[in-house]
Amino acid sequence: MKTRLLHLFVCAALLSAALSAYGQGKVYTRKVRLEDFPTRTTKIVLSGNSILELTLREEVAIHWRISPYEFCTPEEYEGLRTSNSHYFLRLAHDEGISYLILTKGGRDDEKESLKKPFEVVRMPIANYEEPSGRELVLMGAFLDIIQAFVEEAMISDRTAYTGLSAANGTQMRGKRLYLDEDRSDEACLQQEADALVGVTIAPSQISFNTVCYKMLISADTHELYYFEKARYRGPADGRFTDGEIRRFEKRGAEICR
């Protein structure tokens, strides 16, 4: 049922894109709007010298590979964000969650949809008010996941419209799955082969709009194997459920408790 609903959503999104561009005689889907990504400069927006930003700067230098990049300040970002010639990667927070957000610049009032701004992908990385420090260990993985998503979205409208949850059908046969945080972090630091690590991110405060995220990430290749966004009503929602674990086992994972 969930897969069918996702398929219907993607179809509806594509139809909406077609209708919105009908007056111009052209259809610009998200895949088409991303075609120039490898040739455009991605501006990495950094505002200071926090540990999180220093880690992001270091990991970008190591991991960023799919487009030219430059670092810029928030002031420079404000001056450039209406430029359709740039993409931007920046840290932001919403409803108690910190994100890495990749956007394309542009003006909202542009008549041609190809030149309008849009959000490419939003990667949750930490509890904003009480970060655990795992985001520092996983920063390289988060950057690799963003880049892998962009590469796939450039050739697949399904991925472009579905988002990070497009990874949820990936098989896990031959993989060991660690759900314990300490063991997961060790596997990431050691780049343990054939290991998947469980990552959960939830806010400290609860409101009507709060959500949490659950992910499974390869410790050595940084591939995303599972991504779930869910409403957050308390700590129980921020943990992997028995039902999820059974689904991971059916997909071939060996659960290491």
Image: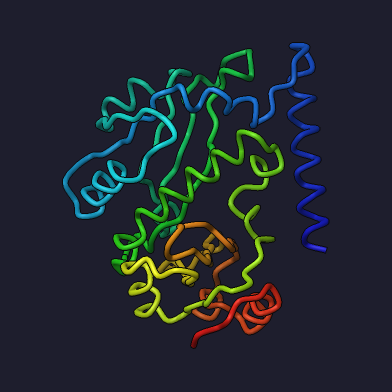
Question: Which residue is more in the foreground, 132 or 140?
Answer: 140
Q: Is residue 230 above or below residue 256?
A: above
**Image: 17 above or below 6:** above
Q: Please tell me whether residue 169 is drawn above or below residue 12 in the rendered image.
A: below
Task: Specify the color scheme.
Answer: rainbow
Residue 230 is situated, as x and y percent measured from the top left of the image, at 60, 65
- Image quarter where the N terminus lies is bottom right
Which one is nearer the viewer's eye here, 170 or 55? Answer: 170
Q: In this view, which residue lies farthest toward the bottom?
A: 257
Residue 119, compared with residue 239, is above or below; it is above
Determine the residue positioned at 54% across, 63% down. 211
Residue 209 picture location, percent across and down: 55, 59
Q: Left of 170 or right of it: where is 1? A: right
Query: Percent from the top left, x then y, of residue 199?
Result: 46, 69
Say which of 232 and 206 sits in front: 232
Kindly indicate the quadrant of the structure image that contains residue 75.
Answer: top left
Q: Position of residue 213 (x, y in %)?
A: 52, 64
In this rendering, the count of numbered labels is: 0
Report the residue at 25% width, 31% height from top: 73
Name the residue at 48% across, 79% down.
Answer: 179
Can you tell which quarter of the image residue 17 is in? top right
Q: Residue at x 48, y 43 (%)?
A: 147
The part of the image, by quadrant, that contains residue 129 is: bottom left
Most foreground residue, 203 or 170: 170
